[in-house]
Image (spheres, grey):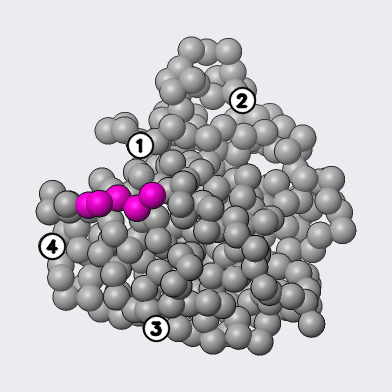
Amino acid sequence: RYHLFVAGVCPWASGVRAIRTLLGLEEVVSMDVADGQSSAGWVFLEGATCNPWAGRDGPFFIHEAYQAHDSTVTTRLTVPVLWDQKLNKIVSNDSWALTKMFATAFAPLGNNKGLSLLPPLLADEIEKTQSRIYQGLLNGVYRSGIARYMGNAEGAAAAATEVYAALDNVEAQLQNSRFLLTSDAPTVVDVRLAMTTFRYDASYRYAFGLSGGKGSILSPDSGYPNLQGHARDMYGHLGGDVDWQAFRQYYRWAGQGFKGPLPCLEELASYAAAPHARRTP
């Protein structure tokens, strides 16, 4: 009944995609992955595999789902999108709402019923942590990068300062705990954080001009050893849902002044897959 539209470049969509995999929801929620963005928005070159578009030649554009839901729609055309094939309606395009929906209402339908990514006793703390890391880091990188692209140097610098402060705070938080809120198992906020840290060296540091702070996260000379370990730890859980090649799409925001060189994605992927020393006490 349910179908998920995502894009490999988008950390919000990729986080929902990863939670679908972690909970074993592949047989409950089908999925299409966008090939990228066009002048008409997110595009799926081979078409959509869900009703009512299944069997139609591609390309399929995400605006078709929005317009099928509401022909007068004027909202931003974003992913992820959870589509109800029975009602021909969008369930939600809010990545945080979908994250919680999958981790609660959908979780019992999956093949990994022993995994609790949103334990009820941690629900309030998860909301607080999500709000904190979203403002300074997860969305902060975009506020800085887009301000830079738009020529707002002051806005870009202010947002970058918030990003570096958020990185320092998370680095300190991970000093004595394997995961953000527990020492034995990840929660949804660990997934959200990891989808940003995987992209940091590959895209944000270069395309968004975030070259300050303590430097790299994933590389052997990382300035954030706890974040590096956390990213490697999470990569063992999420690696199959990380589309490294899609990260190149960020460079459309780099501006005409960007001279390169581009970071080696294969090298960064090998850093993410390297062993980590984080252990449950």
Residue count near mark 2 (Cα–Cα under 10 Å), binned few <14, some 14–19, many ≥20: many
Front residue of this view, candidates 212 and 157: 212
Element at label 4: loop
> In the rendered image, which residue does mark 1 sit on?
37
Real-space Cα distance between discs 4 and 1? 23 Å
Tell me the kind of residue under disc 3: Ala
Q: Main secondary structure of the magenta part?
A: loop
> In the rendered image, which residue does mark 2 sit on?
50
Residue count near mark 1 (Cα–Cα under 10 Å), binned few <14, some 14–19, many ≥20: some
The x and y percentages for residue 273 are 60, 55
Element at label 2: loop
- The disc, 4 or 3, on the residue closer to the chain's N-terminal end is 4
> In the rendered image, which residue does mark 3 sit on?
165
Front residue of this view, candidates 249 and 270: 270
Q: Is residue 164 above or below residue 14?
A: below
Specify the segment rendered in magenta: 260-264
Q: What residue is rendered at 54% in x and 86% in y?
A: 172
Q: Nearer the viewer, mark 3 or mark 1?
A: 3
Front residue of this view, candidates 235 and 104: 235
Real-space Cα distance between discs 1 and 2? 20 Å
Q: Quadrant of residue 32?
A: top right
Q: Quadrant of residue 191?
A: bottom right
Q: What residue is rendered at 64% in x and 68% in y?
A: 276
Real-space Cα distance between discs 3 and 2? 43 Å
> In the rendered image, which residue does mark 4 sit on?
151
Q: Nearer the viewer, mark 2 or mark 4?
A: 4
Tell me the kind of residue under disc 2: Cys
The x and y percentages for residue 223 are 43, 77
- The disc, 3 or 2, on the residue closer to the chain's N-terminal end is 2
Q: Is residue 106 above or below residue 195?
A: above
Tell me the kind of residue under disc 4: Gly
Tell me the kind of residue under disc 1: Gln
